[in-house]
Amino acid sequence: MKFYDDAKSGMVFVQRNVQTASAQRQQIFMQAEPCHIFHFCNAEQIGTGEDSVIKFGAVCLPKAFNMEWQYKGFLSNTSDAPGVYHDYEANFKTRTLKRSCPEPVADRSCEFPTINPYRHVPSPSSGSPRFVYLMSGQKGIPLPFTDIVKYDTIDRTTKVWHSDGVIGEPVFFPRLGNASTHFGDEDDGWIITQFYKPGAHESEFLVLDAKKIEDGPICRLKMGRDKHIPYSFHGTFCPYVFTHPKPKL
């Protein structure tokens, strides 16, 4: 995978609320600055029809990105082409797409943006989505990913917890479960992340208060001495517990 100069770069917006099964969904293409995107995060539509504006965030990898397994540390050449968080604004009247890089996160290599899963679609009671949680390197250091960054998209500020090891994707667990759609603060919950201690060759799962990321873990779930879990990608929150019946022998 690599960038091709002669190929168009853009985003396609596909209509969802068609009235009948036979109706054709409208597809709108908007030219965009060349980049590769694995993960989007918060999104909000303002207005309707041709007057719509959609705002969203994403981690963008630059034109130099490719799928080299650089230093056996990540699935791309992150040291040469680090991912950086950007804000987007799609204007359906002018068919234009604007991209900006917020200053508080502009110098941080990051991936796996996460938000409260019950605030993906804003409700009248919840308001606009605000917080994004990022797996990040230290400022100016692409790898390894050592920090969890909480980015406030409204105040344009960050809170950071710096670990002494390597972290994985931050996963948001809303304290109120399903009720978090309408009740409680957007950051009322916990962040859980996989953590690896290279010196000890051990893994843990860390639990952080999403409101106070900078305070560090409030709980550490240790795998045991000299035990580790291979570096993984994704986790997700589920409000239910699934159990398997005991096998019949």
Image (cartoon, grey):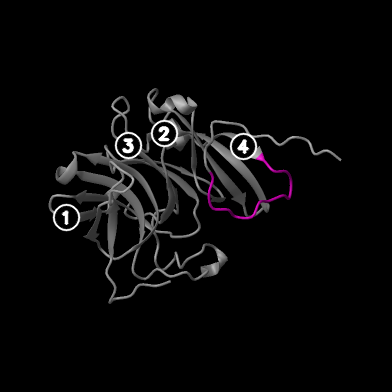
Q: Nearer the viewer, mark 2 or mark 4?
A: 2
Give yes or no for contact between labels 2 and 4 (Cβ–Cβ under 8 Å): no
N-terminal-most mark, 4 or 1:
1
Element on which disc 4 rests: strand
Mark 2–mark 1 Cα distance, whole angstroms, equals 29 Å
Question: Residue 95, which numbered label?
Answer: 1
Left or right: residue 69 compared with residue 151: right
Q: Nearer the viewer, mark 4 or mark 1?
A: 1
Asked whether 69 falls inside the magenta stretch, the response is no
Element on which disc 2 rests: helix
Question: Residue 130, which numbered label?
Answer: 3
Mark 4–mark 3 Cα distance, whole angstroms, equals 27 Å
N-terminal-most mark, 3 or 2:
2
Mark 2–mark 4 Cα distance, whole angstroms, equals 25 Å
Instruction: Establish if 240 lies above or below 15.
Output: above
Residue of label 2: 118
Element on which disc 3 rests: loop
Q: Quadrant of the C terminus?
A: top right
Instruction: Name the amino acid, label 4.
Output: Arg
The image shows residue 23 at horizontal and vertical percentages of 28, 48
- Give neighbour class at mark 4: few <14, some 14-19, many 20+ (Cα, 10 Å): few
Question: Which residue is at 29% across, 57% downward?
Answer: 12
Query: Toward which corner of the image does residue 19 lie, by quadrant?
Result: top left
The image shows residue 22 at horizontal and vertical percentages of 31, 48
Instruction: Name the amino acid, label 1.
Output: Arg
Give the residues drawn in magenta, as a range. Answer: 222-235
Foreground residue among 146 and 90: 90
Give yes or no for contact between labels 1 and 3 (Cβ–Cβ under 8 Å): no
